[in-house]
Amino acid sequence: MSKFSLFGKFSVQEGERDTMVEILLEAAESMENVNECEIYLVNISETEPNTVYVYEVWSNETAHQASLTLEATQTLIKRAKPIITGMERIGTLQTRGGKGISHDA
């Protein structure tokens, strides 16, 4: 069993990090009832005031791609676009298990 995991970095305009965090936390909340999304964590770094990191774990990559088409996701993307100055996919991983991960086949 392996899951699709994604570690991403959003760079935002000066002073907009908290706004981006709020938008991404809304995204995390919108994933509460999406069973294929197992983990959606929003993170900041004390040394990068214009950066927000997101770590996601999905049942598979197809489920992640499908989530990007949801109406709630599209609305949040539209809100975030004006303040985003860059996006980077730090890595995609195959999660094998651990605390917080379901063991479904």
Image (tube, helix red, strand yellow):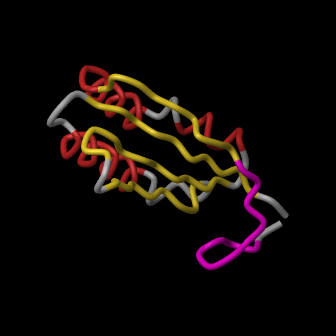
Q: Does residue 60 appear to the left or right of 86 in the view shown? A: right
Q: Does residue 96 appear to the left or right of 9 in the view shown? A: right
- Tell me which segment is drawn in magenta: 93-103
User: Residue 78: image x %, image y %?
Assistant: 31, 23
* Foreground residue among 34 and 80: 80
Does 83 appear above or below 101? above
Q: Does residue 55 appear to the left or right of 1 in the view shown? A: left
Does 84 appear above or below 72? above
Task: Give the tally of numbered discs.
Answer: 0
Q: Does residue 53 appear to the left or right of 25 in the view shown? A: right
Instruction: State which quarter of the image contains the N terminus.
Output: bottom right
* Foreground residue among 33 and 46: 46
Give the residue drawn at x 61%, y 56%: 57
Q: In terms of secondary structure, what is the magenta stretch mainly?
A: loop
Give the residue drawn at x 39%, y 54%: 42
Q: Is residue 13 magenta?
A: no
User: Residue 72: image x %, image y %?
Assistant: 37, 37
Instruction: State which quarter of the image contains the C terminus.
Output: bottom right
Give the residue drawn at x 53%, y 61%: 39
